[in-house]
Amino acid sequence: MLVVATIVALTLLGAGGFAVANGAAALLPERPEGCDQPDRTVQLYAVELPRDGNQIRLGYGLTPETASYPGPTMEMTEGECLAVTLHNQVPAATLEQLRTDPTHPLGVSLHVHGVKYTQLSDGTVQSYSYVPPGQSRTYTWYAKKRDRTAGTPGTAGYWWYHDHVVGGPHGTKGIGSGLFGGLVVRRPGDLRPDRTYMTVFGDQQSINLRRGAAADTCDQENPQPGPTCIVAKKGERVEFIVVGIGNDMHTFHVHGHSWADTRTGVVNGTNAETDQVPTIDNKTLGPGDSFGVQIVAGDSVGPGHWMIHCHMQFHSDAGMYTTMHVLDENGNMPPGGEHDHATAGAATAPAGAAPAGGDAAPAGSGAAAHQHN
Amino acid sequence: MLVVATIVALTLLGAGGFAVANGAAALLPERPEGCDQPDRTVQLYAVELPRDGNQIRLGYGLTPETASYPGPTMEMTEGECLAVTLHNQVPAATLEQLRTDPTHPLGVSLHVHGVKYTQLSDGTVQSYSYVPPGQSRTYTWYAKKRDRTAGTPGTAGYWWYHDHVVGGPHGTKGIGSGLFGGLVVRRPGDLRPDRTYMTVFGDQQSINLRRGAAADTCDQENPQPGPTCIVAKKGERVEFIVVGIGNDMHTFHVHGHSWADTRTGVVNGTNAETDQVPTIDNKTLGPGDSFGVQIVAGDSVGPGHWMIHCHMQFHSDAGMYTTMHVLDENGNMPPGGEHDHATAGAATAPAGAAPAGGDAAPAGSGAAAHQHN
Amino acid sequence: MLVVATIVALTLLGAGGFAVANGAAALLPERPEGCDQPDRTVQLYAVELPRDGNQIRLGYGLTPETASYPGPTMEMTEGECLAVTLHNQVPAATLEQLRTDPTHPLGVSLHVHGVKYTQLSDGTVQSYSYVPPGQSRTYTWYAKKRDRTAGTPGTAGYWWYHDHVVGGPHGTKGIGSGLFGGLVVRRPGDLRPDRTYMTVFGDQQSINLRRGAAADTCDQENPQPGPTCIVAKKGERVEFIVVGIGNDMHTFHVHGHSWADTRTGVVNGTNAETDQVPTIDNKTLGPGDSFGVQIVAGDSVGPGHWMIHCHMQFHSDAGMYTTMHVLDENGNMPPGGEHDHATAGAATAPAGAAPAGGDAAPAGSGAAAHQHN
């Protein structure tokens, strides 16, 4: 009830806080400085998707038919200006169901991290920059370059976009229903990935809003990359866009692979400064955080089913994990590491594993022999 | 009750743990090495302030009359030595009310992060370096420079100072009542801000111990910078000192503005190493963490009411946000982004917003036409 | 109950998810590429240790007799390949007590962070790479160097190894019982520490699984470095390996000492890029995170009992702290900072502390005079 009371106070603030009357001022700018004319335009649709159990699901898509959660990963290059027109096709009745306060307006918006936009593209109720049901609105994003004089960094990075209106003033219900997606801003010269995956860590131990088995539904015979199937051939450059949503803290841990704690996960340069960048394989992230990681699949470690999980033990135990399935160079998954269904509860060192340590032959404990071939 | 029991154990440890008897040793040093004589002295007063509802409020001030929470932002330059004399004017009866354990001594202290100080300036009960009611004590802080031989970094950074004694051995009640402030240590050559703001993220969704509307009380006609009013003209260099207190994790997110994840938020240098520094607009912080961010207000994005909030959704929904009010170069806030009170529940794309996307004219959903002028 | 249900789903996924049948693929590699022959071998024993109250305790050791929690700190140099043979001497009955699911296999494993290993050394049930009771298995770790062409960083860093099988698919009960230890991978030219300490921050306000007074049991007359005694002489280079385990967020804060937020805590190089590395004295860490910090004990600040604690106030209040006891160069602890047992509840400024600020002589509040000598 404390929370409710505070929201009311906030609403009053929102109403009263912007009563600025100053006729002499210029208008709010339509577009960011440096972006006189968009270089590209994109149509984006917000639609309702089939429910997940009782949960309402919404998604962004480049067409209404291809909407998904996460939405499409956008890509820009520093210096570029992008105009995204959002068409709100989510039924008003659905938005009403998600509303936590009857005075809160109905609508869907597009709020983006990292790049530049004016108040008219902020995607908030306060700035009046959202889209009522059935309407459209154009948001302008500018991937500004670094300004060496001002000391401001470029906007290259791994970002995300999301609703900021559905349900309440911070889009909590919009995000929680699926209205989010990734944005990569590259710098000329950046290494290009072979595959890009979104892993959005959220509440209730979810990855991309899926829990447990639903987070990894790869077809074992013919794995297809997608929101619930992370697959790569050995040697491919895989890029993860990692985003935190909701209320909980998480950590992003990958087995067998590590990365530099830099803008891209890659390490550049040749001097002493570079050598002091930490290498990590587990990174804490809070809601709103986003970062990108480029790794080379199976580098040195080979193919296999490499776990990706939150290292908070009660999160991973409750199902907050997925798998990066690394195939060999020919697209096959070697045998030898799989779990033998027939001998659940048993395990043994693989035959031939002993040259270094001279392990004892597997015996006892009900273990069945397990061969590589 | 577990907590209480453990505190008792700790107290016993504190009592027994330091019974060192070694007559041959030298005394503990009065001041840090390299700081034979303070370069400056500051008088700091700890006083009781008016309650916030039922909550006891304390504050540090350069005079008793100007005490506030956060306390005054201190500034030092690397190489400098500062002597801060703390005068404890908080009534003993108030300190007693905040005490969690009747055997815990009454007093107020000054514990600082980042800079150098000896045990006699540690500000803890264990080191005997606190100030009983009505007394004074001088704390010596040394902003040591980098030592290239030892590999130890300089102390330049964004730090905070706080009580470490009120209520219990870690100053939990002192911090929670308002006994904290910021410290900036600069390096010669650092860019200087036009304005510096503290944003202390704490429990119960508080910013600077204020919740909801109380965190942003700017006078719209004549906004004055202060703990509850963040305002700047477009182009001004604004510096945030961000500190986490209490028990909860938070994230610091600013709309429309991003920064480099460096010592100052600014990015320097010209080579490849620099280009791999992440740019961020959302940063996770835990209690005790502090960092600084310099941004250029309205850079590329223009004036407006730019939200600053914790991106944990239940925190922002419960009121954990404030606003950076960016005026135009003349000090005016342009119209065009404000919420129309008369049409609450309605929204529309501003007229003239359509050049890029050819948006439909606002219609339906009870929306009223909204013009820029 | 939600958790239990989800674990069941996970188990099914684990069973079904790896049913890959592709006869044409090569076998999973035995060792990482670049590691044809291990440079060194280590024998590691997993044993049961005396209980801590009701809590089962397990430990890794280089011999069964020296097993401890944390286990022995391993050290490697980039380019090196290490074969660790794990002997599981934990009684099956003990493992059964820790099992959360009767279909989960019994065993102990070795999962390592940061360095390279193939699926056969992953230490997970899914990869079939664990050790049933009474058996042994060799795990191969490769401290791969940086690959400048691929942009992949070297594996130098501060890591940890841990069980990934005891109790459930993520080793939650193994880690929680003590099956973890540190791994340092160095780069040629790295500064060498005089002393290395592990500080593993975990649930229930524990450091190295000890709570409150049990975390700091230094013999005051003859302090011996160990898991529960952090001691150093002034000027010694002390290295902390900081690891997060369990479910909770923590922060690692050290009084009087700070470090660069780099791979080692040390700052190298001479140019502008280096100068923008943040200096910190408080770092947030989540479970699975690990980092290393090298500091010079007592640098500028002198000897004393320097607190190390989690800055989440309810954690520190509940006993989550230990102490770095910094002796003078001769190995003595100077008097002057200790708490006077006879005057518990009283405090005063030390005599002679007044040159800078001209403090008032201690008086009132029941304080007894306190002299340095």
Image: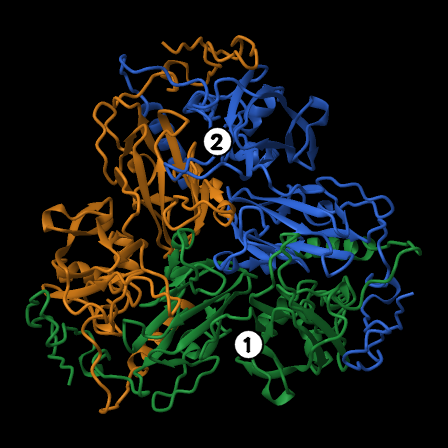
Chain colours: A orange, B green, C blue
Q: Is residue A253 left or right of residue B348?
A: right
Q: In which quarter of the image is residue A79?
A: bottom left
In the picture of the structure, the residue carrying the numbered disc 2 is C144
Three-letter amino acid code at disc 2? Lys
Chain letter for mark 1: B
Question: Between marks 2 and 1, how big is the CA–CA gap?
Answer: 48 Å
Residue B344 location, x and y as percent?
21, 77
Mark 2 vs mark 1: in front: 2
Task: Identify the residue at image location x=86%, y=74%.
Answer: C352
Name the residue nearer the viewer: B353 or C106: B353
The reply to whether the C-beta atoms of the residues labelled 2 and 1 are less than 8 Å apart is: no
Residue B42 location, x and y as percent?
67, 81
Q: What element carries label 2?
A: loop
Q: Is residue A179 visible?
A: no
> Which quadrant of the figure contains the N terminus of chain C?
top left
Residue A269 location, x and y as percent?
42, 46
In the picture of the structure, the residue carrying the numbered disc 1 is B70
- Judge the density around disc 2: few (<14), some (14-19), many (≥20) Cα neighbours within 10 Å: many
- Judge the density around disc 1: few (<14), some (14-19), many (≥20) Cα neighbours within 10 Å: many
Three-letter amino acid code at disc 1? Pro
Chain letter for mark 2: C
Residue C313 location, x and y as percent?
60, 60
Name the residue nearer the viewer: A174 or B228: B228
Task: Identify the residue at image location x=70%, y=83%.
Answer: B89
> Which quadrant of the figure contains the C terminus of chain C?
bottom right
Measured along the vertical axis of the image, is residue C153 above or below residue C92?
below
Q: Is residue C144 visible?
A: yes
**Mark 2 vs mark 1: same chain?**
no
Measured along the vertical axis of the image, is residue C41 above or below residue C191?
above
